[in-house]
Image (tube, rainbow, N blue to C red):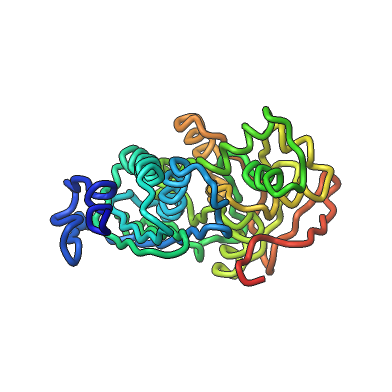
Amino acid sequence: MSEFDLIKRYFTRAAPSALLGVGDDCALLQVKPGAVLAVSSDMLVSGTHFFPDADPYLLGHKTLAVNLSDLAAMGAVPRWATLAISLPNADEAWLARFSAGFFALASQFGVDLVGGDTTRGPLNLCVTIFGEVDAAHALHRSSAKVGDEIWVSGRLGDAALALAHLQGEINLSDEHYAVCAQALHQPEPRVALGLALSGISRCAIDISDGLLSDLAHILDASGVGANIDFSALPVTPVLAMYLNTPLGRRCLLSGGDDYELCFTVNEHQHETIKAISVQLSLPLTCVGRIVAGQGCVVLDGNNLPINFETIGYDHFR
């Protein structure tokens, strides 16, 4: 099978939202009047971001999901994507499952694949995602203010706990692993939440490298500090079993791969956020507050600082 046969068979779909989609030198995209483009790229590398024997359907889902999560953090509507993929060989069974997982999620969020590239090489997946957002209501990392409440969506730490199991750091039961594996392999992009926060939240970020690491980006960009209430952080019953261990605390605070949103709002919007939680059937939890100063302090039940070894994942450390 040639490169162009591969593209035609597995990655060419109608792109009704584009003026021109797959099949030419460039795609042609028309942004809606009054909107600006929100653009993000994420790369997934075999052996770094996923195991070489990962289920290709789940991998197709996650390849797009991590990019949709970036759009969610900006309050953007997903529109288009390109996919650049390096493959060791043209395994048709693998390609069929990967593309099925990718397009299932693309269909769910109304994303059209409008271009990309394929080449032979180590397995490497790179998506560039395009969304539309009202420039006046885009969520920025630099807009947190002293006194803001800090909120997170969903539950944190399960994906990191599942990875710890796969890496042999801990031995979870089949039942407990199944709970955590869902978070690791099939993260749910919080696009609806990002849109609901438009005009309400000051800023947001998606939690990909760990809560402390990603919150630090907001603090640095905004020139503020934060206090986090450890006991308020939302966890599943599985992770709760390990919170008294260094591994459990690491998974919760700095494990990464959560793909939930961390966002700040004025304290007067507290009840509005609770209403959004009900509306979306999505847990939203106030976990701390923006304060004057620098850095983040995590406080225990006695309001004493908790020490931690790392704040999140960094590819070059």
- Tell me how many marks there are: 0
> In this rendering, would 287 be left or right of 54?
right
Q: Hey, which quadrant is residue 131 in on the image?
A: bottom left
Q: Residue at x 69, y 66 (%)?
A: 295
In this view, the residue farthest toward the top is: 175
Residue 173: give x, y in percent of width and height. Answer: 73, 31
Image: 158 above or below 26: above
What residue is drawn where x is 86% and y is 46%? 302
Instruction: Give whichever of 186, 296 is nearer the camera.
Output: 186
**Relative to 273, 81 lies left or right:** left
Q: Horizontal and vertical percent for residue 160?
A: 66, 47
Q: Residue 166: x, y in percent?
A: 67, 45
Q: Residue at x 56, y 35 (%)?
A: 283
Where residue 209 sits, quadrant-wise, is bottom right
Q: Nearer the viewer, residue 75 or 114?
A: 114
**Image position, residue 187 (x, y; %):** 51, 42
Q: Tell me the residue at 61%/59% (across/down).
A: 215
Examine the rendering and report whether any part of residue 264 can be seen.
no
Closer to us: 282 or 226:
282
The residue sitting at the left extreme is 19
Asked if one can make out residue 218 in the rendered structure from this viewpoint, the answer is yes
In the displayed structure, 186 sits above or below 212; it is above
Q: Residue furthest front?
A: 1
Residue 218, image quadrant:
bottom right
Q: Quadrant of the C terminus?
A: bottom right
Q: Is residue 151 above or below residue 280?
A: below
| Residue closest to the eye, 29 or 170 | 170
